[in-house]
Image (cartoon, helix red, strand yellow):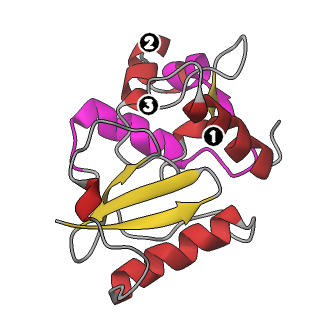
Amino acid sequence: MNSFIFQSPIGCLTIHHHDTAVLRVELPGDNQIKGSKDASLLSNLSAFQQLVTQQLDEYFKAQRQYFDIPIDLSTTPYRKQVLQALLAIPYGQTSSYGQLADELNSHPRAVGGACRNNPLPILIPCHRVVSKSGIGGFAGNTSGHLIDSKRWLLNLEGTL
């Protein structure tokens, strides 16, 4: 597995990948993955890393609404189903946990759990899922920097 750091407006994202697909996006303050100190900075990037960097840069400048970066969706069948449903939420729109649960014949808490464990935030837009009573959580957080990041992303996409 290879890693590199992308400096975004919401902080440093650590991108973990193999030669042909992104495996995980580590958000700023995400303590679930250790070893990010070994990630390459934005110099001497491979062609694949340059592709990822270009598309993320375009997204954060509101010049890209869809990613066509290869991603690795190796996960449980249920989580894969939820992640694919997240990919279907268009840029500039949101869906509630309940709406997604209805589409998937599931429960809102199960959808929330799959969103919380999304290995590819931003590339798979879990930030577009909100609660019926507000913004909801982001990456397992209901306050703090990551919720501020979710607001920033929704503002970028024109949904707040």
Please name the residue that numbered disc 3 is placed on.
115
Neighbor class of circle 1 (other Cα within 10 Å; few <14, some 14-19, many 20+) is some
Q: Which amino acid does label 1 sit on?
A: Ser
**Image x and y of residue 101, in percent:** 50, 20
Q: Which of marks 3 and 1 is in front?
A: 1
On the picture, is 86 further left or further right than 113? right
Q: Left of 84 or right of it: where is 99?
A: right
| Image quadrant containing the C terminus | top right
Q: What secondary structure is marked by label 3?
A: helix
116 or 147: nearer the eye?
Answer: 147
Labels 3 and 1: the sequence-earlier one: 3
Q: In this view, does 74 lie above or below 48?
A: above
Magenta range is 74-101
Circle 2 sits in a helix, a strand or a loop, which is it? helix
- The three-letter code of the residue at mark 3 reads Cys
Q: Position of residue 43 (x, y in %)?
A: 40, 85
In the rendered image, which residue does mark 2 sit on?
109
**Distance CA(mark 1)–CA(mark 2):** 22 Å
The residue pinned by badge 1 equals 149
Can you give x and y, in whole percent of width and height, for residue 8 in the image? 58, 60
Look at the image and tell me whether residue 107 can be seen: no
Which x, y percent locates residue 72?
28, 58
Q: Can residue 103 be seen in this view?
A: yes
